[in-house]
Amino acid sequence: MKKIFFALSLIFTLVVFVGCGEKKQPLKIYSIIHEEETKALTDLFTKRTGIPVVFLRASTGELVNRVIAEKNDPQADILLGGATNYHIQANKAGALESYKSPLAEKVPPYAKSADDTYTGFCVLTLGIGINKGRFESKFPGKKYPATWDDLLDPAFKGEIVLTNPVASSTAYLFVQNQLQRLGEEKGWDYLLKLAPLVGQFPDSGSAPAKLLGTGEYAVGVSYLHAVAKYGADGFDVATIAPPETVGDVDCIAIMKNSKNLDAAKKFVDFMLSAEAQELMSSIDFTIPVNPDAKGAKGSIPVSQLDLIDYDVAKAAEQKESVLSKWSLNVK
């Protein structure tokens, strides 16, 4: 199976990365962030540096597994996006290169690794999304849920959408949010009370915001920026930042044994710049990490959030056992 995986991986990579200009070696990127943002950012990078870029966009789990499997002979130079616990996973496997960008000095401590193997470029915050029309139709006169505990209202049964934590880093972050704010015993009690109220557990982290936007559910757990984007696009949604929520960062890292290290370092510098982070926020409403960058109108500043002291290392260490328990107890 491993031989087949490597063969397919090599063939797929060659197909994806074919057709690049020959004047300069292209920078090759595995991108976890959405294709629209990836293209806008890489186009601007090429415009600023003259370095051509090709990218493969796929899910977090798929690309992190590729990075680890290819660590001795990487088929890309950059891993763009993904929450910190996934970068910790790749780093523990020896798949990431240490690089401290000059712009990393402006990055808060919670958004970068101690050994400079990964650095955050935008803040991701979990919250509650509401489809206003559906909510008012299903629950006339009822107040929107304002806290995580409000989601346990039995009236919401079948009207909540939450991503599957086994498949999605977004939902795993939600699971850890509850375990870390309530403690292990009370956290699991909360999760096992909530699960029967959930109408759907899609695999994609972007699905709840989309399903809220299209009015298929009244309530959803999602990144706030994803719901805010649907609101800016004219969908009938509202965002709620509950107290004791969790914030994480989308990170960038260079592959160990990168074949284009100088270009990779330049791309990290670019992604930490105010220009790149403002561009990304203008597309997807994420909150920039660079203090000099302004978030898009409609995004919620970090200063307005009530965040728990999230233990990223603990979340990474517990991942296998937590997801195993979830799979056994949530059907």
Image (cartoon, grey):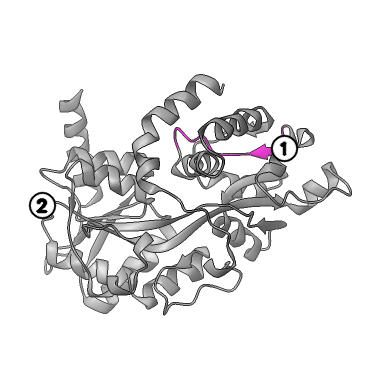
Q: Name the image quarter holding residue 277.
A: bottom left
Q: Is the magenta stretch mostly helix, strand or loop?
A: loop
Callout 1 amino acid: Glu
Callout 2 amino acid: Asn
The residue that appears at 54% across and 45% down in the rendered structure is: 181
Q: Residue 17 lies in magenta, yes or no?
A: no
Question: Circle 1 sits on which residue?
Answer: 159
In the rendered image of this protein, does residue 91 appear above or below residue 285? above
Precedes in sequence: disc 2 or disc 1: 1
- Closer-to-camera residue (276/3): 276
Q: Is residue 11 visible?
A: no
Is 233 placed left or right of 323 in the picture? Answer: right
Per the image, label 1 sits on a secondary structure element best described as: loop
Q: Name the image quarter holding residue 110.
A: bottom left
Percent coordinates x, y for residue 264 in the rendering: 19, 63
Asked if the residues shown at circle 2 and circle 1 are in contact, with their CB atoms under 8 angstroms apart, the answer is no
Percent coordinates x, y for residue 307 in the rendering: 53, 57
Per the image, label 2 sits on a secondary structure element best described as: loop
Tell me, for residue 257, which label it has, or none.
Answer: 2
Q: Name the image quarter holding residue 267.
A: bottom left
Please give the range of residues in magenta: 158-167
Residue extending farthest right? 141
- Closer-to-camera residue (92/24): 92
10 Å neighbourhood of mark 2: few (<14), some, or many (≥20)?
Answer: some
Percent coordinates x, y for residue 180 in the rendering: 50, 43
The residue that appears at 48% across and 77% down in the rendered structure is: 294
